[in-house]
Amino acid sequence: MHAKAQRIQEFLTEHGEPGRVRELPDSARTAAEAASALGTTPAQIAKSLVFVAGDEPILVVASGANRVDTDRIGKHVTGPVTRPDAKRVRAVTGYSIGGIPPFRHQTPLRTFVDVDLLGFDTVWAAAGTPHAVFPIAPDRLVALSGGEVVEVC
């Protein structure tokens, strides 16, 4: 298992999570790719997106079927909400775009979780690489990420 995926598996195990990291032969960089590889819908993919509010990096974990509305996020933060470049994303998370997990980042991030994810029993999230994913109950995703549940889309 890739070292970054192994870090996520260790985190899940430490927190009593039954879900196991799966490394896929094909890319799961996008919600559509992940859904196709897993035989599920993009709505059940918990995509992790990094934004910047003022100077503060934040994480938004959204349903793969949804597009994040920065104005909605802006109601919960100070400063304009923008997208950082890939270099800054990697610096604050420790992961490349397409493999960002919802927790265990290089820098602790204020996290917002899309309320739409709570409509599922299980969602799938990235596990550190564009080929690794894991299943998790949405309420556990919220708890382990320290996320605030909001309407982000």
Image (cartoon, rainbow, N blue to C red):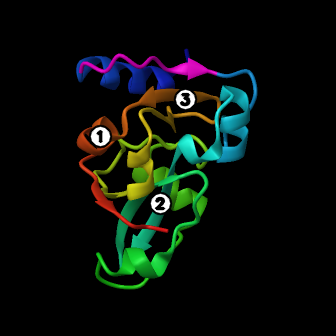
Residue 18 magenta-drawn?
A: yes
Q: Which one is earlier in the sequence, the residue at label 1 or at label 3?
A: 3
Task: Give the amino acid at mark 1.
Answer: Asp
Which residue is identified by label 3? 133
Which residue is identified by label 2? 50
* Residue 135 screen position, x and y as percent: 47, 27
Q: Quadrant of the N terminus?
A: top right
Task: Give the amino acid at mark 3.
Answer: Val
Helix, strand or loop status at disc 1: helix
| Distance in Å between CA atoms under marks 3 and 2 | 18 Å
* Residue 81 screen position, x and y as percent: 44, 78
Task: Characterize the local packing of mark 1: few (<14), some (14-19) or many (20 or more) Cα atoms within 10 angstroms.
Answer: some
Helix, strand or loop status at disc 3: strand
Q: Which marked residue is nearer to the observer: mark 2 or mark 1?
A: 1
Q: Judge whether residue 96 can be spotted in this image.
A: no
Which residue is nearer to you in this view: 6 or 45?
A: 45
Q: Residue at x 56, y 58 (%)?
A: 87
| Distance in Å between CA atoms under marks 1 and 3 | 17 Å
Task: Characterize the local packing of mark 2: few (<14), some (14-19) or many (20 or more) Cα atoms within 10 angstroms.
Answer: many
* Residue 150 screen position, x and y as percent: 33, 64
- Residue projecting furthest to the bottom: 79
In which image quadrant can residue 96 be found?
A: top right
Which residue is identified by label 1? 139
Q: Which one is earlier in the sequence, the residue at label 3 or at label 2?
A: 2
Q: Are marks 2 and 1 in contact (CB under 8 Å)?
A: no
Region of the chain picked out in magenta, as a range: 16-23
